[in-house]
Amino acid sequence: MFSGLAMLQQPPSSSKPDRLIMVKKRLANGEPCGKCADAERTLRDRGLWSRIDEVIWAEELDAESPGMQLARKHQVTLAPFYVRTVDGHERVYTSTLKLVQDLQRADAAAALPSQAQPSLEEIAELEARFADAEPEQILRWALERFGPSCAIAFSGAEDVVLIDMAKRTELPFSVFCLDTGRLHPETYRFIDRVRNRYEIAIDLMAPDTRNLQAFVRQKGLFSFYEDGHHECCGIRKVEPLRRALAGYRAWVSGQRRDQSPATRNRLAVIEADSNQGAASPLVKLNPLAGWTSAQVWEHIRAYGVPYNELHDRGYVSIGCEPCTRPLRPGEHERAARWWWEDATKRECGLHVGPVPPTR
Ligand code: SF4
């Protein structure tokens, strides 16, 4: 474990884009730690060692060594770890296997024949071309075009339907999930059931620790009941989403138009997402835009797709535990999310593309 509380004085390396730093720990006896040596062997065995641009040492006896400074900066307490910068976004890996997986995924994406990111004009053409297409057709097109650079954002029943459809194509794809830290225990069990059922890796994206600590310290754990959910959602969902999407060219959401007449009634099946900080817009796919809740549940029953057990207890749209309640008779499904706020504000900020909420 690292020690020392001093703040980072200077960045120990340059911040050129697309850069990968490995931080190794050197023990007091001058030897590298065993886990760091194992990690290097893993990277060499998989032909990925050349991808490390720089090795930085965290000296056990020197709290100010460059590796120790990086560890404090990123609040990492274990070695080895990696700092990967892609398109100006830094991502920290504490798992060598996760790094291997992401590097291989990037390589697979680079090997795809068509690498040009669709322009805004092409995305508009695609929107028209697929406007009435079946969800499976839209998904197949995306996975053939982007492969594992296309990620399904997983949280609810619709998203597992999309994972189920994607799995049936036998094409590679990626899945991530925003772990806000406030999900129901049932939701965490559901995530793991999906992971096991489809034998897929699911990247759980946690909020930035420093932002979250500062927010909770200042406002406590339930400020959203007082001044609205957007600040908390911004830290626990929107920023991790942006971080998750930094590695992808396209992403898939399970949004449906009929989920919210107030905010989703003009949802397109394909749209440009210019909100994630990437140089070119990402392609955002909403293959279920035209589906109803009944169609989603027909697919779930027909194919035995796993679903969140909370659905059996009256929950319909499921988000974080403090901001979700069971639906009452006669209510629209989004009425049970942030129910204390105006209906036009019941979005978490994840879906702010070219579809403006109607006022
Ligand atoms: S849904 Fe509620 S708890 Fe979850 S991030 Fe938003 S405001 Fe915070």
Image (spheres, rainbow, N blue to C red):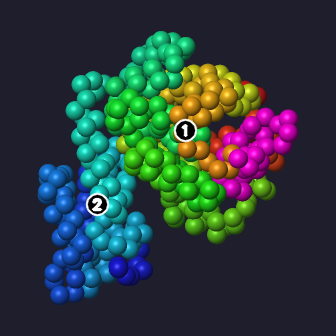
208 horizontally vs 6: left or right: right
Q: Please report the bounds of the magenta region as a residue range.
A: 312-338
94 and 183: which is toward the camera: 183
Question: Magenta region, mostly helix, strand or loop?
Answer: loop
Which residue is depicted at the point 39% across and 41% down? 174
Q: Position of residue 215 (x, y in %)?
A: 62, 63
Residue 94 seen: yes
Mark 1 falls on what kind of element? loop
Q: Position of residue 200 (x, y in %)?
A: 40, 46
111 and 282: which is toward the camera: 111
User: Which mark identifies residue 304?
Assistant: 1
Q: CA distance from mark 1 to mark 2?
A: 34 Å
295 and 148: which is toward the camera: 295
User: Which mark identifies residue 96?
Assistant: 2
Mark 1, other Cα within 10 Å: few <14 / some 14–19 / many ≥20: few
Tell which tag, 1 or 2, sits nearer the viewer.
Answer: 1
Q: Position of residue 72 (x, y in %)?
A: 39, 72
Q: Quadrant of the N terminus?
A: bottom left
182 and 200: which is toward the camera: 200
Q: Position of residue 214 (x, y in %)?
A: 59, 66
User: Which mark identifies residue 44?
Assistant: none
Q: Earlier in the sequence, mark 1 or mark 2?
A: 2
* Above/below status of 342 relative to 27: above
